[in-house]
Image: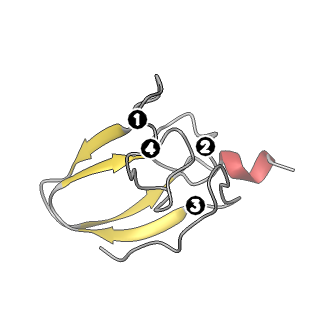
């Protein structure tokens, strides 16, 4: 896994985040404040927001949602194309 470029807290990108993920557990950030967005860094602690946990049994390329508007969380569904 490569580390994504840090995003300022609360900032999301307009397109997806594509990453080669190893076989292991991942936590997709739902609070959009993580410094490792779209991956959770624990910033949500103390709130009612929790990350979405995903387990991969084998390595794969993943197209993560990085805009926060997908209807197929945590994966990109193209919803970012409708953002202004």
Q: Secondary structure at mark 1?
A: loop
Q: Are marks 4 and 3 in contact (CB under 8 Å)?
A: no
Using the numbered discs, state the Cα–Cα distance from disc 3 to disc 2 in whole angstroms.
Answer: 10 Å
Q: Residue at x 70, y 51 (%)?
A: 80
Q: Nearer the viewer, mark 3 or mark 2?
A: 2
In the image, farthest residue toward the front = 46
Q: Secondary structure at mark 3?
A: loop
Horizontal side, residue 48 vs residue 15: left or right: left
Whether 23 is drawn above or below 47: the answer is: below
Q: Are marks 2 and 1 in contact (CB under 8 Å)?
A: no
Answer with mark 1 or mark 3, whichever residue precedes in sequence.
Answer: 3
In the image, farthest residue toward the top = 48
Nearer to me, 80 or 12: 12
Residue 7 picture quarter: bottom right
Using the numbered discs, state the Cα–Cα distance from disc 2 to disc 4 in whole angstroms.
Answer: 9 Å
Q: Position of residue 35 (x, y in %)?
A: 50, 60
Residue that carries the numbered disc 2 in the rendered image: 68
Answer with mark 3 or mark 2, whichever residue precedes in sequence.
Answer: 3
Residue that carries the numbered disc 1 in the rendered image: 45
Answer with mark 2 or mark 4, whichever residue precedes in sequence.
Answer: 2
Residue 59's mark? none
Residue that carries the numbered disc 3 in the rendered image: 16
Label 3 Cα neighbours within 10 Å, binned few <14 / some 14-19 / many ≥20: many
Residue that carries the numbered disc 4 in the rendered image: 74
Using the numbered discs, state the Cα–Cα distance from disc 4 to disc 1 in whole angstroms.
Answer: 19 Å
Q: Nearer the viewer, mark 1 or mark 3?
A: 1
Q: Nearer the viewer, mark 2 or mark 1?
A: 1
Horizontal side, residue 15 vs residue 35: left or right: right
Label 2 Cα neighbours within 10 Å, binned few <14 / some 14-19 / many ≥20: many
Answer with mark 2 or mark 1, whichever residue precedes in sequence.
Answer: 1
Answer with mark 4 or mark 1, whichever residue precedes in sequence.
Answer: 1
């Amino acid at each position: 896994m490569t580390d994504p470029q840090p995003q300022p807290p609360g900032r999301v990108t307009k397109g997806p985040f594509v990453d080669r993920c190893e076989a292991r557990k991942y936590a997709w950030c739902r609070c959009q404040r993580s410094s490792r967005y779209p991956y959770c860094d624990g910033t949500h602690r103390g709130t009612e927001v929790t990350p979405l946990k995903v387990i991969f049994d084998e390595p794969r390329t993943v197209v993560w949602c990085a805009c926060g508007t997908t209807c197929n969380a945590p994966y990109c569904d193209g919803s970012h194309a409708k953002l202004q």
